[in-house]
Image (cartoon, grey):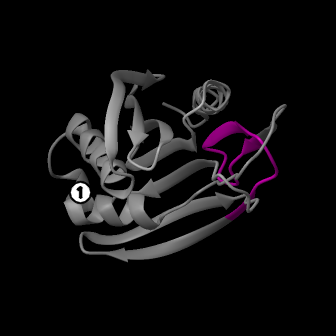
Amino acid sequence: MKSFLRLLLGSSVAAVCLHCQDPGVEFTSAAGDFSAVFPGPVSQIEEPIDSPDGPVVARMAVHMQPMTPVRQYIVSSNALPAAVLQSGGPAERLLRGRAGLLRRYPGQIESEESIESGRHPGRAFEIRTRSGQRIVARLFEIKGRLYVVSALTPDEPGEIRRARKFVRSFQYLGSD
């Protein structure tokens, strides 16, 4: 299961925006299951991924602008294999998802809390990476899918505010 989450968080990118500015673009996934306000246009793909824990379907939407320093805004919606869903509970799977982000972007957790989207469990946290950037993220497990909402930005107050605004814009649109 750990290898699945590492694969999921290490290779599945759903919606990416690099060095974007406000006011933002309201984006709704093609499946209609989530919306978020991105700092730029987004295109979508759906991709099957083979993982050690079983096949995964990743729904992805991508917007990229190659700029330095890197700024990424990401939302991914990934089906969890049955083996993953049958082991542990949602809280444990969310912590493993957070651990996957820490493996990909080593650093220090600056803040963390349990949250909800509707009645669905989630985790909100911020990481200061060893490379001097900040990750602002929220993870939710909803109806057998892992939603990862994150922003990777320079560790500067204005950038962090923009990242927090982005992750808070995520809304699950499906029925409970």
- As drawn, 10 above or below 18: below
- 85 or 39, nearer to the observer: 39
Q: Quadrant of the N terminus?
A: bottom left
- As drawn, 169 above or below 5: above
Q: In the image, what residue occupies the spot 70% across and 54% down? A: 30
Q: Position of 90 compared to 130: left or right?
A: left
- Can residue 24 be seen in the rendering of this structure? yes
- Can residue 142 be seen in the rendering of this structure? no
Q: In the image, what residue occupies the spot 48% across and 22% down? A: 118
Q: Position of residue 126 (x, y in %)?
A: 42, 32
- As drawn, 65 above or below 25: below
Within 10 Å of the Cα at label 1, are there few (<14), some (14-19), or many (20+) other Cα atoms? Answer: some
- 65 or 98, nearer to the observer: 65
- As drawn, 149 above or below 69: above
Mark 1 = which residue?
Answer: 84
Where on the picture, by quarter, is residue 165?
A: top right
Q: How many marks?
A: 1
Magenta stretch, residue numbers:
27-44
Q: Position of 147 compared to 51: left or right?
A: right
Q: Secondary structure at mark 1?
A: helix
Residue 28 within the segment the image draws in magenta: yes
Q: In the image, what residue occupies the spot 53% across and 52% down? A: 76
Q: In the image, what residue occupies the spot 67% across and 37% down? A: 36
Q: Position of residue 62 (x, y in %)?
A: 68, 60
Mark 1 is on which residue type? Val
